[in-house]
Amino acid sequence: MPRAPEPKPVFVDHEGGRVQRFRTGFTAIPAMRSLGNLAGKNLPQALKAARAAGFVLASELRACGLDMSFTPVLDLDWGNSEIIGDRAFSANAERVGLLAAALMNGLLLAGMQACGKHFPGHGWVKLDSHLALPRDTRPLSDLRQHDLQPYAHNNSLNMAAIMPAHVVYDQVDTLPACFSPFWLEEELRGRLNYDGAIISDDLDMVGAHSMGGIAERAAAALQAGCDAVLVCNTFADMDTLLTSQLAQAQPNAQRHRRLQRLLAQPVPCLQNWQQLQALPDYQAALATLELLRNY
């Protein structure tokens, strides 16, 4: 019996290109910017393609035993960012909201929850938060008028998770958004009425280092309003957290409820890898993506 492809992790492209961490044997998912470009010519076709991209991405991962992908990127493509690049759908907030909603619909159809990122927006700043701590100098009114609009648009879908940015918004708060009670509790939960899980961006990124050692970073993120934290690149940091008091602490009732919802699968896993290849919906989604490559 043929086996599923051997997943090959592909790390972040610091030139701002498409990031797909499982490539060998998997369908190449088009850059989100290509969906935004198509939306400027044919919005219905772009929405269909975004839904197909979400379905293919999620169904292939689920067929290999993975149950979540941290997608979609809701950042606006201001043309500044070294790391966001063509991962963003568009500079048009309404277009980003519509395409993200379609992609999340595809994810959900294949049984995968969505995680919107990087709240409140990483597209304006030039620096890469993997390598530095970026600072966005715009006033809150500008952020609400532009970068926050995709979150407001998609809050009606009640995304299972949102990931905040390791970016400081100088005119709003001195803390990076991932560690800011203002951004997480007042703006996201309060003004936008978001009730899903908040998951930190990778705490090994340089943009998080201003908060201290790994235990201090994790504690600060949780205290600010995150429900869970990511540590993705340093094994020693993972070991430190797993043996810390934070790992032993029981989540409060609200945090437990949000995390349980995040772990719940919207639908059962559709197929294993061999059966997936013959699934009509999967084949139709692949054909839709192939059409997109011709634009």
Image: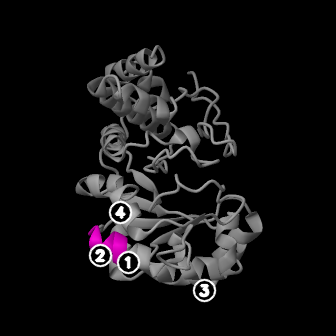
Magenta residue span = 185-193
Instruction: Name the foreground residue: 165 vs 77.
Output: 77
Q: Residues within 10 Å of mark 4 (few under 14, many from 20)?
A: some
> Quick check: marks 3 and 1 in contact, CB under 8 Å?
no
Pointer 4 residue:
144
> Quick check: marks 2 and 4 in contact, CB under 8 Å?
no
User: In terms of secondary structure, what is the magenta stretch mainly?
Assistant: helix
Amino acid type at circle 3 is Gln
Pointer 2 residue:
190
Amino acid type at circle 2 is Gly
Measured Cα–Cα span from mark 4 to mark 1? 16 Å
- Please identify the quadrant where the N terminus is shown: top right
Label 1: which secondary element:
helix
Amino acid type at circle 4 is Arg
State yes or no: residue 191 in magenta: yes
Q: Nearer the viewer, mark 3 or mark 1?
A: 1
Q: Nearer the viewer, mark 4 or mark 3?
A: 4
Measured Cα–Cα span from mark 3 to mark 2? 29 Å
Measured Cα–Cα span from mark 3 to mark 1? 24 Å
Amino acid type at circle 1 is Glu
* Mark 4 or mark 3, earlier in chain: 4
Measured Cα–Cα span from mark 2 to mark 1? 6 Å
Instruction: Indicate which disc residue 281 carries.
Output: none
